[in-house]
Amino acid sequence: MKIGNVIAILGLSMLISSVVRADPKEDGFWSSVSKGNVAEEYELYLDQYPKGKFALESKRRLERLKGKVIGAELPEPVVRTGADATAEDVLWATLKQNHRIEEYQAYLKAYPQGRFVQAAKAQLQRLVREGEDAALKADDEAWRFAEVLGSSEAMQRYLDAYPQGRHRVKASPLLERARQKEAREAEDSAWKAAEAKGEFDSYKAYGDAYPNGAYQPLLQLRLNTLESKEWAVAEYTKSRAALERFIKRYPQGQYLAQAQVKFATLPTPKQIANRYQDNDDGTVTDFKNKLQWMRCAVGQAWDGSTCQGTADKHTWEAARLMNSNFGGYSGWRLPKIEELKSLLYCSSGNPTTWSDGKPCEGAYLRPTINSYAFPNTPTASFWSSSFDDHFPAHAWFVVFGNGDALTGYKGGTYHVRLVRNGQ
C-alpha cells in the first residue's frame, strides 16, 4: 500500500469519526481508557460502545497489545549469506536495514511467492500502523497547543494543518468565537485610546475604523461636545485657520452655516515675506516647506501682535517629549535640524541658504530669523530633535544669534519652538 493511500485511508477514518455525533460521556470514557492503554479497558470500551467513534482505534490497539499482527507468530526465514545467498536474500537484508514502506511493497511485487512474504507483510502492516499512530498523535498535540493558546491564529493554524483532523468539529466554532472576542477587544482598545486623547483626530480614527461600532452613540456625543467647544473658539477668535479647520471637520455640523458666513467675511489672509501665512492664532504656515510653526518660543505668550514674556529653557529630552493643543491643533513636536535651519534668515544675504552649514557673515541683523513672522525671538540656541550620529549623547541646535548650527550635550538647556506638519 502506498503512503498516499495510507494517508487517504487515515484521513477518511478521521473524517468519519469527526462527523459522528459528539458524546461527552464517550469522549471522557475513551480519554481514560487511552491513557491507561490496557487490553481489558479497551475491551470494556468496546462492550460499552461497540459502534463508538473510537471503536476502530480501540480494536487496533487491542490487537497490538495481544500481539495479533499478521505474520508475527511465524518465524522469519534465515537470510542466507555468502555463496548460498540469492538475489532475494540480498534484497531482503537491505530492506530490513532501511525499513521503509515503499521498499517492502517493491519486494512483494518482485517476489509475490518469496520466502519472506509473510515477514514483509507483517513489517508493512506495522509501519502503516506506526504511521497512523504518529499522525493521530501529531493531530492531538497540535490541537492541545491550539487549545492552550486559544487565539484565532492558533485555531486557524490547526485547521490549515489538519483540515480533516479529529478536532476540526470543535475547532471551527472556537475559531469564530476567538475572532469575535479579539474583534471586541480591538474595538475596546481603539475606543480607550480615543478617550485617552480626547481629540477630534482620535475620535475620527475610531469612527472610521468602526462605522458600526458599539461606541458609536458615545462617539456622537463626544464629537458634538468637541464641535461646540471648537465653534466657541473659532467664533471668538475669528481666526481664518480656526474657521477653516472647523468647516473641514464638521461638514454636517449644526454651526456650519454660521461658520461659512463668518469665513466668507474675513479679510484676505496676511502673508509675511511671501513665505508665511499669518493664521491669526499665534501660528504661521510656511508655504515653502508646508510646515506650521508657533510664532512664539515655549514660555512666551502670543497677545495678538507679538510674543510676550521670557522664553523657557529645557533639556533635550524634556523638549523632545513636549506636545500641545496650541491654537486648537494637535501634533506639535520638536523640529528636525533641517526644519529648524529653514527658519534661519541672514539679512546680509551671506549665505542665502544654509545648505553649506555656514553661519551668517558680513553686516546682518540679529536674531537671524524673520522677526515679522517670529517676533521677540531670543538670539540664543534652540533645540532640534536630531541627535549627533557620532556622539549619541549630543543633539543638534541652532543659534539664532549668528545662524550657526552646532551639537551639544543633551543635558544642557536651550530654548524650544514647536512645529507641526502643515495642512
Image (cartoon, rainbow, N blue to C red):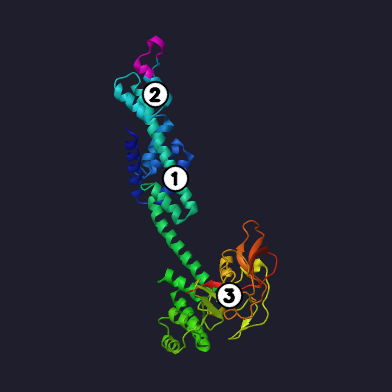
| Residue 333 as seen in the image, left or right of residue 408 | left
- Whether tag 3 and tag 1 are in contact, CB under 8 A, the answer is no
Residue at 64% over, 74% down: 363
* Amino acid type for the residue under numbered disc 1: Asp
User: Quarter-wise, where is residue 296 in the image?
Assistant: bottom right
Cα distance in 3D space between marks 2 and 3: 79 Å
- For residue 13: magenta? no
Number of marks present in the image shown: 3
Q: Nearer the viewer, mark 3 or mark 1?
A: 3
User: Quarter-wise, where is residue 356 in the image?
Assistant: bottom right
Can residue 331 be seen at all in this image of the molecule?
no
Mark 1 nearby-residue class (10 Å; few <14, some 14–19, many ≥20)? some
Q: Is residue 264 above or below residue 373?
A: below
| Residue occupied by mark 1 | 140
| Residue occupied by mark 2 | 95
Residue at 36% over, 25% down: 120
Indicate the quadrant containing the N terminus: top left, top right, bottom left or bottom right: top left
| Residue occupied by mark 3 | 324
* Amino acid type for the residue under numbered disc 3: Ser
**Which of the two residues, 86 or 272, is positioned nearer the viewer here?**
272
* Amino acid type for the residue under numbered disc 2: Leu
Can residue 327 be seen at all in this image of the molecule?
yes
